[in-house]
């Protein structure tokens, strides 16, 4: 197998992970800051913004709809147009690889008085969209997609949305956020019932933009917005990007690493709990709050891990971290069982299948089940892995390379730029022997 689609990584075994590093800004929060900043009144200034392809796709989309956004690589400045100030884009809006952009924006655009067409790359064009389209239709939105329930999505923006009460059939923050954004424009109130916790960045940020939602146990209610007010937002480092280094420093003997200024929102941080159950040595230092989000420095020392049954209630709150948690499980003593994670099959790739393929290629014993994986801890032999164009699969196997017997080459790594620009450089700085192959 060789790469014929973008760059490859080569990782040689033996690095020690140490020092203090800062991973790029949080992807989920960056998307939301752009979206709310665009439809707020007045200026919004964002620091710590993720300069990744996914979040830049969201920025481009709003520029296409007439929003003035300046980005000098450090500060993103938005001149908000107000709730009804967006303009129809003259072209289809291409959201690249970004599921968050398309699902959240479908909700937001359903409330506009102009038509929009949303498209994306090969991976995004296959991902399920009916989960957002169906409840939006019951809010009186007019939306079409393919028969398979995929992009392109066409939104006819002429209908007045109506508030609904909706119980989420899947634990998805993208779906919840889509409906909250539509709820800003709906007549009456929109209530969402979530039976499993999912990330709550939208709820927190609506409050930062002066339109608080109410939460009563697992019921979240939003009322029609009169206005959002532009604000300054300082985005923490992305916990999901930090996760690669949490596992790297845990499995590479002799490691001692501090990850600075990482978001530790309780609806995102279950991977810490999972790693602790496996025996990891992780301390949270300097806990504080920043722009409505909890933040800390994460201190990791290497340790021996043991296999566990991953508690199902932790799955939605650690959903993006499973590729690298599975790598940790491969280095643990004994068996690790993951179930209740069927959502992994509809991410940027089928992450259960992509991880299984990589395990087979590198000599780890694992077996897939419909909604998870059973992994026998052991040793990576080394070999060549296909990331299936999925950023998190690519970075997970790069981490595995630290402790393999021979080098691991990961192919098709171009999409690492969607969430983690500068990954290779930062991994080198932290002590990994990683190069572009
Ligand atoms: C996200 C929610 C999750 C996550 C994705 C980002 C968000 O997706 O996997 O990377 O920003 O709301 P789902 O809502 O589909 O679980």
Image (cartoon, rainbow, N blue to C red):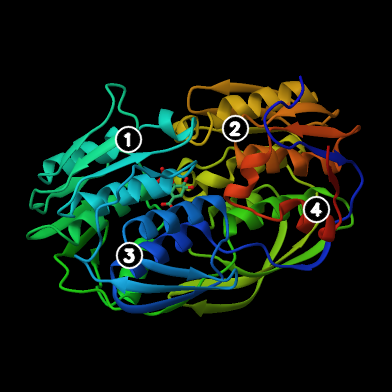
Tell me the number on the disc at residue 203: 3
CA neighbours of label 1 inside 10 A, class few (<14), some (14 to 19), many (20+): many
Residue at image location 9% in from the left, 44% down from the top: 140
4 or 3: mark nearer the eye = 3
Give me the C-alpha separation between circle 4 and circle 2: 20 Å
Counting residues from the N terminus, which is met first, the one under dot 1 or under dot 3?
1
Give me the C-alpha separation between circle 1 and circle 2: 29 Å
User: Seen in the image, is 165 located left or right of residue 177?
Assistant: left
1 or 3: mark nearer the eye = 1
Q: Residue 344 at x, y = what percent?
A: 50, 34
Q: Residue 251 at x, y = what percent?
A: 80, 48
Q: Is residue 393 above or below residue 270?
A: above
Counting residues from the N terminus, which is met first, the one under dot 4 or under dot 3?
3
User: Seen in the image, is 348 located left or right of residue 429?
Assistant: left
Give me the C-alpha separation between circle 3 and circle 2: 32 Å
Counting residues from the N terminus, which is met first, the one under dot 3 or under dot 2?
3
Quickly name the residue at label 1. Answer: 129
User: Seen in the image, is 28 located left or right of residue 37?
Assistant: right
**Pointer 3 with pointer 2, Cβ within 8 A:** no
**Pointer 4 with pointer 2, Cβ within 8 A:** no
Q: Quadrant of residue 41?
A: bottom left
CA neighbours of label 2 inside 10 A, class few (<14), some (14 to 19), many (20+): many
3 or 2: mark nearer the eye = 3
Q: Is residue 324 above or below residue 37?
A: above
Residue 267 at least partly seen: no
Tell me the number on the disc at residue 303: 4
Quickly name the residue at label 2. Answer: 337
């Amino acid at each position: 197998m060789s790469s014929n689609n973008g760059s490859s990584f080569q990782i040689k075994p033996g690095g020690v992970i140490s020092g203090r590093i800062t991973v790029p800004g949080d992807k989920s929060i960056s998307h939301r800051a752009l979206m709310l900043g665009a439809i707020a009144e007045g200026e919004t200034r964002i620091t710590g913004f993720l300069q990744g392809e996914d979040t830049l796709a969201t920025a481009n989309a709003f520029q296409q709809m007439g929003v003035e956004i300046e980005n000098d690589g450090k500060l993103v400045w938005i001149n908000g147009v107000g709730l009804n100030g967006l303009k129809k884009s003259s072209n289809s809006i291409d959201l690249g690889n970004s599921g968050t952009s398309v699902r959240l924006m479908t909700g937001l655009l359903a409330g506009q008085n102009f038509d929009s067409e949303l498209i994306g790359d090969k991976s995004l064009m296959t991902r399920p969209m009916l989960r957002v389209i169906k409840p939006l239709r019951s809010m009186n939105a007019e939306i079409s997609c393919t028969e398979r329930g995929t992009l392109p999505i066409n939104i006819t923006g002429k209908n007045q949305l109506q508030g609904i009460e909706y119980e989420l059939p899947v634990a998805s923050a993208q779906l919840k956020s889509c409906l909250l954004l539509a709820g800003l424009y709906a007549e009456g109130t929109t209530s969402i019932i979530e039976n499993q916790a999912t990330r709550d960045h939208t709820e927190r940020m609506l409050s930062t933009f002066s339109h608080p939602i109410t939460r009563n146990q697992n019921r979240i209610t939003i009322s029609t917005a009169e206005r959002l007010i532009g604000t300054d937002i300082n985005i923490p480092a992305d916990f999901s990007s930090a996760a690669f280094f949490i596992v790297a420093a845990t499995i590479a003997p002799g490691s001692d690493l501090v990850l600075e200024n990482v978001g530790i929102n309780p609806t995102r941080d279950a991977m810490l709990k999972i790693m602790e159950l496996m025996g990891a040595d992780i301390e949270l230092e300097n806990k504080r709050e920043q722009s409505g989000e909890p933040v800390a420095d994460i201190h990791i020392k290497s340790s021996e891990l043991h296999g566990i049954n991953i508690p199902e209630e932790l799955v939605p709150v650690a959903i993006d971290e499973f590729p690298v948690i599975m790598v940790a499980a491969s280095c643990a003593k004994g068996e690790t069982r993951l179930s209740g994670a069927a959502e992994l099959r509809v991410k940027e790739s089928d992450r259960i299948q992509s991880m299984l393929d990589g395990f087979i290629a590198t000599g780890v014993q694992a077996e897939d089940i419909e909604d998870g994986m059973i992994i026998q801890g052991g040793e990576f032999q080394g070999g060549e892995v296909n990331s299936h164009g999925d950023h998190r699969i690519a970075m997970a196997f790069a981490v595995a390379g630290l402790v393999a017997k021979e080098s691991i080459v990961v192919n098709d790594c171009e999409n690492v730029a969607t969430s983690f620009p500068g990954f290779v450089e930062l991994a080198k700085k932290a002590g990994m022997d990683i190069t572009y192959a």
